[in-house]
Structures are given as structure tokens and as C-alpha cells.
Image: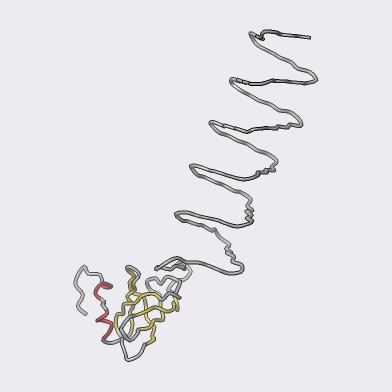
Amino acid sequence: MQVKSGTTLIAEVTEATIGEPAARSQSEFATGQVGEVADRRFRLETEHGPVLARRAVSCLVEPQTGDRVLYVVEEEGRGTILHILSRPDPERQAVTLSNPDGPLRLRGSEVSVETEGSYAVSAGGISLTAPKAELTAKTLTMVGEGLQQVYGRIQTNTRSLETMSERIVTKALDRVEIVDNTDNQMIGTLSVKVSGVMTQASYSTVLVATEDLRMDGKRVTVG
């Protein structure tokens, strides 16, 4: 086969090129080595010469350059990779499961993923649906531009809770806040507006003002 300078080999290995040595009156099984990968097609180096092949649907592991594979050439001259036999450096090259022609689904009564290293998920969108979900981690970090939560009820139990924000808005029909020991508030300016009645009851109340203490109303009763 005459190879022109600057021309990709996989483009020059056509179905006609395969047909001469590889095609027989019946399908032929053989082994070869992946020489080049382009556009979901693979150029295989075989004892019959270069063969252009695609990956079988059942071959979920993506072949890589240098892999030794089992392939078949059908009567019409089409090559298909059936299985990956070996890889030159399997410890340094990742094994990738994929379906180039459509979705990939895992189904079983129970599915588990176990690793001693890290587990990463990268996707355009993630949807999780389950009657019950549990997440256990020593440290949990969530980073994002927006978080929206819609629940029937939220219960949080923690030894210490720290919240830092530029602005906090809380709106509720009823609110109950219970502090058993001490409630300390450090505020630059405090403004409280009550449309109805405001009551405050304590064993002892102390009001301290550096300059002015004012009480204004139609009727002020002390004692």
C-alpha cells in the first residue's frame, strides 16, 4: 500500500483493502495489535496486513493503541474487535468502559463500587432518585454557585454550627427559638418592628446606654 506523506493511515485502509487478504468464504477469527484509533475505528496490524475494524457492542472496554485484540473479519470484509487480550502497560493505562453508539447502563439486584483510591464523577448533569439515601463521610465539602433544597422536614443535630454569610433572610409563619444557657449577640445596628404586641419577661432586666435612652409612646407606664 502506497502511503502519501501527511496522510492518516486509518483513512487509507478501506473496505476494499481488507477484502483481498482477510475476507474468506466464511468469517475468520484472528489476533492483531491496535495501531491507530480515529473516529471510533481502529487500524489493526495483523499478519495479513492492516485491517480496519470497529468495536463490538459487547466489547465495553475501549481499545487503545498497542492493545492486542481478538477480531473477526466477516464475509463482506468488515472487521470487528471482539475482545482485548492484553495491554502493553496495564498498570499505567486506565481501563475505560463505554458505549460509543448509545447509553451505558449497569443493572443488578445490588451494584457496588469499591476503590482504595479516589472516586470521581464528571457529568453534564446528575440525577439521583431513591426511596432512601445515606451519605457518610468524615469531611464533606460542597462548592457551587447556587443551592436549592425543598423538603417536608429538616432536622439537624450537631455539636457546633457556624454560619458566615453577607446576607441572611429568614421567612416563616411561626418561629420558636430556645436557648438553654446564654445567648450572645454582637450587632452594629438593631432594628425591630412588631406589627402586633411585643412582650418581654425576665427575672431581671438591665438597659445600659452610653448617651441616650428614649421611650416614646402615647402612654408610658413604669412600676
- Give the residue displayed 27% in from the left and 79% down from the top: 15
Foreground residue among 186 and 123: 123
- The residue nearer to you, when weighing 215 against 90, is 215
* Whether residue 178 is situated above or below residue 10 in the rendered picture: above
Residue shown at 56% from the left, 47% from the top? 141
Determine if residue 148 is in view: yes
Residue 189: quadrant of the picture: top right
Whole-percent x and y of residue 71? 39, 81
Q: Quadrant of residue 204?
A: top right
Q: How many marks?
A: 0
Quarter that holds the C terminus? top right
Residue 5 sits in quarter: bottom left
Q: Is residue 187 left or right of residue 180?
A: left
Residue at 76% x, 21% y is 201
Image quarter (top left, top right, bottom left or bottom right) of the N terminus: bottom left
User: Is residue 32 positioned above or below 169 on the image?
Assistant: below
Residue lying farthest to the bottom in this orientation: 25
Residue 125 is situated, as x and y percent measured from the top left of the image, at: 47, 54
Q: How is the image coloured?
A: secondary structure
- Farthest residue in the front direction? 196
Q: Residue furthest right?
A: 203
User: Is residue 92 at least partly visible in the picture?
Assistant: no
As drawn, 48 above or below 209: below
Residue 124 drawn at (x, y percent): 44, 54
**What residue appears at the point 46 percent right and 71 percent down from the top-left corner?**
90
Q: Position of residue 178 (x, y in %)?
A: 73, 32
Q: Is residue 103 left or right of residue 139?
A: left
Image-based side of 17 in relation to 84, left or right:
left
